[in-house]
Image (tube, rainbow, N blue to C red):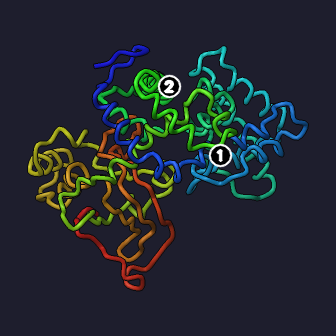
Amino acid sequence: IARDAMVDYDASALDAIIERYAKRLEDIRKNEVYKWETAYRFRQHWNPEASDFAAMLEMSFPMSNNLIAGPSWFPVGMLRIFAKNDPKAVRSAMLALLDEQKPLKERMATFAGRADEWLKAENEMRAAKGEQPAKNHFQDTRSMSVYLAFANPRQNYLYKTGMYREFAKAIGADVPGGKFDKVIAYKELCDSVLQRLEEGWGELIAQSDGLLPPEYRDADPEHHMLVQDIVYYAAAYMPEEKPETGDAEGPRVWVYAPGESAWAWDKCLEERVMLLGWDDLGDFAQYDNREAMATALKSAEEADGSKANDSLACWQFQNEIKPGDVIYAKRGMRSIIGKGIVKSEARFEPERGKYLHVRDVEWVAVGEWDVEAAKIPMSNGNLA
């Protein structure tokens, strides 16, 4: 166990990940170089003193990619709207967020609170015009990490909760509960990874630099983007290299209902997850077999039936779905509304309040298709 910056992790597991990453570096860089490019373009245009703050933001984020936009997630778009409404307030809040002299948790909590106020003001204006309200300001920990990592690349790293959780699990590091505490712990863990890179992987750092134009290297002076790339590799690439499907013919295919009438679908897209209920069972991981789940379900719901189908869905969600498997999300009996690739093992998040069982999913197609017309295969698993 290594102890750097008060972070405990399995150093041998980290070295194994770095070694695998190094072997695939050139191929991975072709897919991930857009991160350095986006950071470079941001630094070309970022000017907090610009007279037109909203226009400056638009120039600073000219590229649409998954760092700053995604299905049902568009933080910079909302930030531009807020900046047009009240440029002085948004400029002040952004500068406060980027002030490294103050505690990170305080800065992020304050910025999120300001975003709540901006969204309220925007929706009051929309209501006066008879327009539909905006549902979300999207100024979450992930979007704030982008602003911080681009503006202050020597202090910050790009962050995603699911990515952090998978990487931490891979190297035996703990993940705290609070959303802002997670970002702080992630930063400390990345600092430890950077220290290990500098101490034992100098050739990898040099190879990474050699794959970047000089201006891109300047946008990442302390190799924080390289650290994040290794973290992302462990969370996203490694599960696809050796999918633990248990099926020699490849990944399994599952059909999944995101709540009754697909009520949780927007949340699944926004958070890049699949969610399952039966919350009265608590953490699915505590049950040794399906029969124990069925017994607990009958007790919790005071039901007389066997609960065979419900317990099967819970058991499959927890134990049989594997990273790399394909998920088709459905609405009702005939409509497929999305296709995704499973990216994580199952986890229990009681702080959600509802639908507490979670897996990370990369939703690669979103729409609505009639099952018979599209001839989409229903499943070679049985989750529903």
Q: Residues within 10 Å of mark 2 (few under 14, many from 20)?
A: some
Is residue 315 shown left or right of residue 350? left
Task: Name the residue rendered at 66%, 29% in the picture.
Answer: 111
- Residue at image location 26% in from the left, 62% down from the top: 383
Q: Residue at x 30, y 35 (%)?
A: 16
> Which quadrant would residue 1 be assigned to in this image?
top left
* Left or right of residue 5: residue 356: left
- For badge 2, the amino acid type reads Lys
Q: Position of residue 30 (x, y in %)?
A: 53, 53
Asked whether 308 or 159 is in front, the reply is: 159
Give amino acid for label 1: Glu
Give residue 37's mark: 1
| Residue named by callout 2 | 187
Q: Nearer the viewer, residue 249 or 36?
A: 36
Quadrant of the drawing holding the C terminus: bottom left
Q: Identify which residue is drawn at 41% across, 48% down.
A: 24
- Give the mark, 2 or 1, whose residue is nearer the N terminus: 1
